[in-house]
């Protein structure tokens, strides 16, 4: 004669592991594959002083074109930030100081160096989609 305990099925370890992995991924947001991207940083002169009133442009890019998502101006200390939702179909988010329509930049400065998460970069201007990135610009005359 079998007992009730012997008749009940034990949960399969593989099923339990799958459920635990799914729960952890859901908590981390992997189930949504977020396209919300946050970029923040500072625009300074080479000497380190913050530069106010400089526009920073956030643009979604794909093979067939691009779409401007946000234009953010620096504050009195040179700081800026922005959060955008990159539309599906766009593979890259670019952040840059636009040459056109940015009178303070074009009248005073010739260009800039880029620092991504504190490290100098020669790769202008991609940003990780779905993440948070520090993007600093050092302007030179």
Image (cartoon, rainbow, N blue to C red):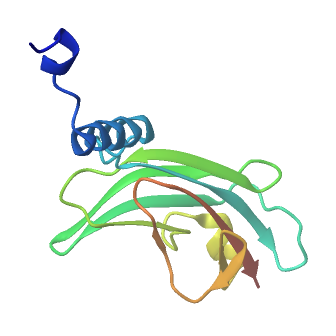
Which of the 4 quarters of the picture holds residue 108? bottom right
Percent x, y of residue 124: 51, 81
Which of the 4 quarters of the picture holds residue 56? bottom right
Asked if one can make out residue 50 in the rendered structure from this viewpoint, the answer is yes
Which of the 4 quarters of the picture holds residue 105? bottom right
Vertically, is 91 above or below 29?
A: below
Q: Which residue appears farthest toward the left when viewing the image?
A: 1
**Quadrant of the snapshot with the C terminus:** bottom right
Percent x, y of residue 107: 68, 75
Percent x, y of residue 54: 66, 60
Asked if one can make out residue 108 in the rendered structure from this viewpoint, the answer is no
Left or right of 65, for residue 26:
right
Q: Residue at x 84, y 80 (%)?
A: 46
Percent x, y of residue 33: 31, 48
Vertically, is 139 above or below 79?
A: below
Q: Residue at x 12, y 15 (%)?
A: 2
Q: Nearer the viewer, residue 40 or 50?
A: 40
Q: Nearer the viewer, residue 91 or 25?
A: 25
Q: Residue at x 25, y 50 (%)?
A: 87
Left or right of 118, for residue 77:
right
Left or right of 65, for residue 60:
right
**Number of numbered discs:** 0
**Quadrant of the snapshot with the N terminus:** top left
Vertically, is 120 above or below 72?
A: below
Q: Which residue appears farthest toward the front when viewing the image?
A: 1
Q: Which residue appears farthest toward the bottom when viewing the image?
A: 122
Q: Nearer the viewer, residue 106 or 28?
A: 28
Q: Residue at x 69, y 54 (%)?
A: 53
Q: Nearer the viewer, residue 37 or 27?
A: 27
């Amino acid at each position: 004669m079998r007992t009730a305990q012997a008749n009940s099925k034990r949960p399969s370890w593989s099923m339990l592991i799958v459920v635990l992995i799914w729960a952890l991924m859901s908590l981390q947001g992997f189930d949504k594959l977020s396209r919300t991207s946050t970029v923040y940083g500072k625009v300074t002169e080479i000497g380190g002083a913050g530069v106010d009133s400089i526009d920073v442009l956030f643009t979604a890019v794909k093979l067939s074109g691009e779409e401007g998502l946000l234009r953010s101006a620096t504050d009195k200390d040179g700081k800026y930030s922005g959060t955008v939702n990159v539309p599906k179909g766009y593979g890259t988010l670019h952040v840059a100081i636009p040459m056109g329509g940015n009178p303070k930049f074009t009248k005073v400065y010739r260009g800039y160096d880029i620092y991504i998460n504190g490290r100098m970069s020669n790769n202008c201007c991609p940003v990780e989609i779905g993440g948070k990135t520090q993007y600093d610009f050092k302007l030179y005359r």
